[in-house]
Each structure stands twice: as structure tokens, then as C-alpha cells.
Image (cartoon, rainbow, N blue to C red):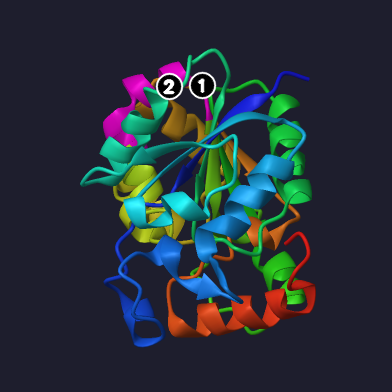
């Protein structure tokens, strides 16, 4: 199976609810058992069999915490800019796995499983969905934003796999999708009135959504239902940080 290149997006400033729990300037630098949050994500990516090269784009403060073999790029002023700064460091021959630095519970098995599921379906842009059932079974105390489709209740993941061409040519849509991934109502507004009404009445199917997303992107979009809630368990508020610290405590000193 062809490998993918990974881009770890670590440029988010710590200016939201997380400030109450930790005063680090950047989210990626918030410590969890003596290691910055980004380190857990980078270790998972590095240990994934299907990942070739890894680029981390973030503040200079995290550079020294990164392991050997990682390409570091100082972050710019926006998510879109960071994605393109990272892409400039890659030869763009492999599909690109975009992953945020705020999912410290992620592990190599979850990443490899997502890449394998993507490889089984024809498409240009693949986005992870996690069912409410899977999430609540694994992390019952986790508070996520869910949306309902015909097929069930889901939350968005923090990983996206796409061809370099799709990222480059759909940059404004990609930026919207990734920055608003936890606010489904904002994403649905991009789809048009018929889709908004269907979404509100819980009659919108995954197939319809994929078809409409594909027409907006100009590239084939595919949703991947992952059995690994870790791909969407992001740390964006104090209760999330407490959950991550609790979940990672038993494996302190080992591979996370």
C-alpha cells in the first residue's frame, strides 16, 4: 500500500477556554505529564506504518521537543497558511494526512486504520467521522458536538487525508472545512437551502452529503467512519485536558 505524508498542525494559540487550565502560549506546548501535547501526536504519526514523511508546522517554542527525522516549519498567521507552508516542504507525490496537534490520545493503530480505510475507497478528500456510540463507549465523560445524519449521530474527526492537488486547488473550502470541523451548522450553511432543511430535519444522508461536498470541492469527497474515537478527542477546554491527563497517566514513560 502506498504511504502518505503527514502534516501536524500545531500553530493554534492558547487563547480559548484552555487558558483557564494552563498558561502556555500555544496549545501544542501545553504539558501532559512532562511532555508538550504535540509530542504525543508526533509519536503516534512516527509510529504509523503508512506514514512516510512528517512535517510539523508550529511555533518555535515546540521545535526542541520534536524527535529526530521530523521536518519543522515555523507557523504563519492562519490555518490555511500553515497548511501551505508545510506542503512546500513535501514533494507532493503522496497523499497528505492533515492532523491537528490537540488529539494527544491518538495512536499509530488509529492512524493506520484510517489510512487503510481511505485506500479501500476511490476519492480525493477523506474526512473522519466518529459515531456518538463509539465515542461515549470509550470516553463517556467526553463532551463533544454531534450532528445527526440518516445513518446515525456523529462527531467530526481531527484528521483529513487528501491528494496534494485537492488541497492546493480547493484551499478556501479546505480551510473552512478544517477550521469549522467542530461546528457542523456552519459547514452545512455552505451546502445550500435544500441541504440545510434536510439536515435540520435529520433526513440528510451521508451519500447526499458526499455528493454535494464533491460538487463544491470539485474533488470526490468521502466520509470515513472510524472506530477510533481518539481521532476526534481533541483538547479544547479544561475538562478535555483533565480527561487526556487521566487517560495518559498509566502509560507515562512508555509510548503513548
Q: Residue at x 76, y 74 (%)?
A: 137
Of 81 and 195, which appears nearest the observer? 81
Expressed as whole percent of the image width and height from the top left, the position of residue 45 reads 65, 44
Expressed as whole percent of the image width and height from the top left, the position of residue 201 reads 46, 61
Q: Residues within 10 Å of mark 1 (few under 14, many from 20)?
A: some
Element marked by disc 1: loop
Where 58 falls versus 81 (above or below)? below
- Give the residue number, with chain letter if any, for mark 1: 163
Dominant SS in magenta? helix
Q: Residue at x 39, y 65 (%)?
A: 27
Expressed as whole percent of the image width and height from the top left, the position of residue 95 reads 57, 23
Q: Residues within 10 Å of mark 2 (few under 14, many from 20)?
A: some
Q: Is residue 19 left or right of residue 71?
A: left
Q: Which residues are magenta?
A: 162-174
Residue 250's quadrant in the figure?
A: bottom right
- Give the residue number, with chain letter if any, for mark 2: 166
Residue 131's quadrant in the figure?
A: bottom right
Residue 246's quadrant in the figure?
A: bottom right
Where 42 falls versus 3 (above or below)? below
Total marks in image: 2
Q: Residue at x 29, y 38 (%)?
A: 80
Q: Is residue 163 magenta?
A: yes
In the rendering, which numbered label is found on residue 98? none
Q: Is residue 201 left or right of residue 84?
A: right
Can the viewer see residue 190 in this picture?
no
Can the viewer see residue 206 in this picture?
yes
Amino acid at each position: 500500500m502506498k504511504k502518505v505524508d503527514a502534516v501536524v498542525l500545531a500553530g493554534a494559540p492558547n487563547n480559548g477556554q484552555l487558558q483557564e487550565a494552563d498558561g502556555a502560549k500555544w496549545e501544542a506546548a501545553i504539558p501532559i505529564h512532562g511532555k508538550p501535547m504535540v509530542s504525543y501526536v508526533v509519536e503516534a504519526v512516527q509510529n504509523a506504518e503508512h506514514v512516510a514523511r512528517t512535517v510539523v508546522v508550529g511555533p518555535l517554542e515546540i521545535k526542541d521537543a520534536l524527535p529526530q527525522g521530523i521536518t519543522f516549519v515555523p507557523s504563519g498567521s492562519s490555518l490555511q497558511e500553515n497548511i501551505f507552508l508545510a506542503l512546500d516542504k513535501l514533494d507532493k507525490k503522496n497523499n497528505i494526512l492533515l492532523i491537528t496537534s490537540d488529539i494527544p490520545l491518538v495512536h499509530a493503530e488509529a492512524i493506520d486504520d484510517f489510512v487503510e480505510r481511505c485506500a479501500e475507497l476511490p476519492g480525493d478528500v477523506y474526512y473522519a467521522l466518529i459515531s456518538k456510540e463509539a465515542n461515549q463507549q470509550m470516553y463517556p465523560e467526553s463532551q463533544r458536538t454531534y450532528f445527526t445524519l440518516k445513518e446515525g449521530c456523529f462527531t467530526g474527526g481531527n484528521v483529513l487525508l487528501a491528494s496534494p492537488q485537492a488541497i492546493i486547488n480547493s484551499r478556501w473550502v479546505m480551510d473552512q472545512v478544517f477550521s469549522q470541523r467542530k461546528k457542523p451548522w456552519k459547514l452545512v450553511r455552505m451546502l445550500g437551502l435544500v441541504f440545510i432543511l434536510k439536515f435540520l430535519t435529520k433526513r440528510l444522508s451521508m451519500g447526499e452529503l458526499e455528493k454535494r461536498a464533491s460538487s463544491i470541492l470539485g474533488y470526490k469527497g468521502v466520509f470515513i467512519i472510524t472506530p477510533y474515537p481518539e481521532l476526534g478527542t481533541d483538547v479544547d477546554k479544561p475538562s478535555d485536558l483533565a480527561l487526556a491527563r487521566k487517560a495518559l497517566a498509566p502509560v507515562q514513560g512508555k509510548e503513548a
